[in-house]
Image: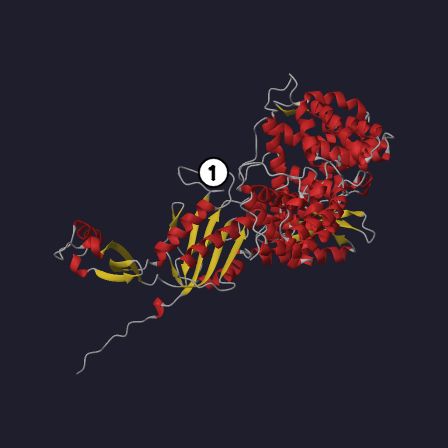
Amino acid sequence: MAPTIKKVSTARRRPRNLLIELGTEELPPKALKLLGKSLADSVYKYLLDAKVVTPEKDASRFYASPRRLALWIKQVAPRQADRTEERRGPSIKAAFDGDGKPTNAALGFAGSCGVPVNQLETQLTEKGEWLVHHQIVAGEDLQFLVNQALDQAVRKLPIPKRMRWGGHVQEFVRPVHWLLAMYGSDPMPVTVLGLKGGPWTWGHRFHAPKKIRVRSADRYLDTLKKEGHVIVDYQERRSMIERQILRIAKRAGATPVIDPDLLDEVTGLVEWPQALYGEFDSRFLGIPAEVLVSSMRDHQKYFHLTDEDGALIPGFIAVSNIKSSSPKRVKSGNQRVLRARLADAEFFWHSDQKIPLADRRAALDKVLFHEKLGSILDKVERIRNLAQLVAETVGANPKQVDRACDLCKADLVTDMVGEFPELQGTIGSYYAANQGENELVCAAIREHYQPRFSGDLLPYNEVSQCLAVADRIDSLTGIFACAEIPTGDKDPYALRRAALGVLRIIIELRLDLDLRQLIEVAMAHFRRDQYQVDASENTQTKVFDFINDRLRAHYQSAGYDAMEISAVMRVEPSRPLDFHNRLQAVHDFFTNHTEAAHSLAAANKRIANILSKQTDSVSKVINSELFKEAAESDLSDQVEHLGGLARTLFQKGAYSDGLVELASLKAPVDNFFDHVLVMDEDLAVRNNRLALLNVIRNLFLQVADISVIRID
């Protein structure tokens, strides 16, 4: 009887889907999406580099809820394929002596490879023949790779401040309590943060506070949803919340204001979302709408509602994390909390206005701006001087600018701003208006904080613009003088945002302000005896360069070519609006006059190289009597004629028109280099030709250094 042959299953060797879940305490809601995506992307990239997954669309997904970060990766191989590694040793000449015996070099190489010399191979290359050794390296098991991937991903997560818990030495954004790891339908005993992977997860903290077994990586979502009352898919949960809000608002005959950032934050707060409608007393509509919105959106995480005209109505939508058996009690609780906050705001609204805003200014002397830069009142006085300088350029009323400076920070010492700090400026503008201040002054109190963030509105009137620029320049120069320069991701004073705000105001509102002058005047304030800071010219240069870095990034993000930006940067214009005009001119020149622009850029590069090799200064005066070739005489005539037209246009700031005139130099410049030897043996002729090139070079430098633009 023939023996029975047992077939070995190969199914377990086929790629399967991978699931990893880190179970935690409640994670920071605003950072939840970023944390989840970063974890999944990092692990996927590691496994992709290890060649156990293939680069495929939707091959990796992230999941995230308040108590978990998870990732799912499609079709992961159980181990790496074996690979052959090649090591090259000494050359054959160095490996063997005249008798063909191996030298110490050959013996040492063979020993390092763990084989005798006679098992080494030879390899012929263009540079000769070499000893080589080929070794088969076994691929790593998937469990080892996932361990490594998780360890690296956890360390690289964008967590500004990590914490420890219990007696653990591990650190994470929040305490981690379980690790779910599934490879297909099998648990994977990987380890991370002191935890060992297994098939277990936990359900909703209130609806299903129990241990739940996950049978396979692909049943994870359904298992948590059905048994755990958790919608773990971030985008699914977000969409669910949005649909619930729209449905409830429609039922109430209102329009919800769904702020995307608030929607993300609420999505990060709940695992089983249940939206509900609530109301507040209509008498609270008598206080500014911004206060009501801030109370609902920023403090309570509620979505506010408007009528068909866009006016607030006394209602809101909250999103709970539980499906209550007594929804009326949940609604009542939310209404009660909001009512208390609005009652406080109403009290502050009335009590604050018993003291005129102007009378609060003196109290700013007791509010510290920076330990080395004095109080807020000190800052206000510095702003005043700068704002008046800006006013001369933008044509603002100096008296209105002065009054706006008096009042711009006064609301910082009101009770309302103490409770709602995000409303500084807004509250001051209301109080000022109620106390009869000029309309532009009131607007400036509010608008000098604009833009508060990327894409925010700019201050629309001249008085507001003066304060907005002055406030930011004072902060930039002062903090730099204190040697607290932003590094890496650390920017505690939001100086990058301040710099970009200054640039946007100047460029988009077309203010012809000189940045170097503003920095110099601002820095002069800090040279007084009361300030013990570094207000040197070196610090001024650092501030200017810092703002210019933001300028470069701003235009790169807007789609401008990096070389075009560098070309303008090389001539160091100090007025951002002038920089914008020059960059636009260079961009248009290379877009609309491509052939001429490319040829002249190459010529400028050639000229720059020639001039850079001259040890003596090159003359700017051309002597036509020294011309020997028709090509140089023709070029000189064209430079004199076209250069005169271009200079006139450049002086008016019409850079595009000037470059269009210079486009006609292409033919005579090409002809010159084709027929004229610049470095003639006759020194006088040579210097005259160098002078001609120098004039051409300086002509283009009135706009930008186009020689840095490479032509592929």
Label 1 environment density (alpha carbons within 10 Å; few <14, some 14–19, many ≥20): few
In the depicted view, which residue is nearer to us: 554 or 582? 582
Pinpoint residue 688: horizontal percent, then vertical percent.
62, 43
In the image, 210 versus 258, the foreground residue is 258
Q: Quadrant of residue 116?
A: bottom left
Task: Point out the residue furthest to the top here.
Answer: 529
The residue positioned farthest toward the left in the image shown: 99
Point out the image quarter for the N terminus.
Answer: bottom left
User: Residue 153, image x and y in percent?
Assistant: 45, 49
Q: Is residue 209 visible?
A: no
Quick check: 478 above or below 643?
Answer: above
**Percent position of residue 370, x then y:** 63, 25
Q: Position of residue 79 (x, y in %)?
A: 35, 61
SS under mark 1 = loop
Which of 63 and 557 lies nearest the eye of the viewer? 557
Comparing 526 with 218, the one in front is 526
Q: How is the image coloured?
A: secondary structure
Q: Amino acid at mark 1?
A: Met
Q: Does residue 130 sit above or below 398 in this rendering?
A: below
Disc 1 marks which residue? 163
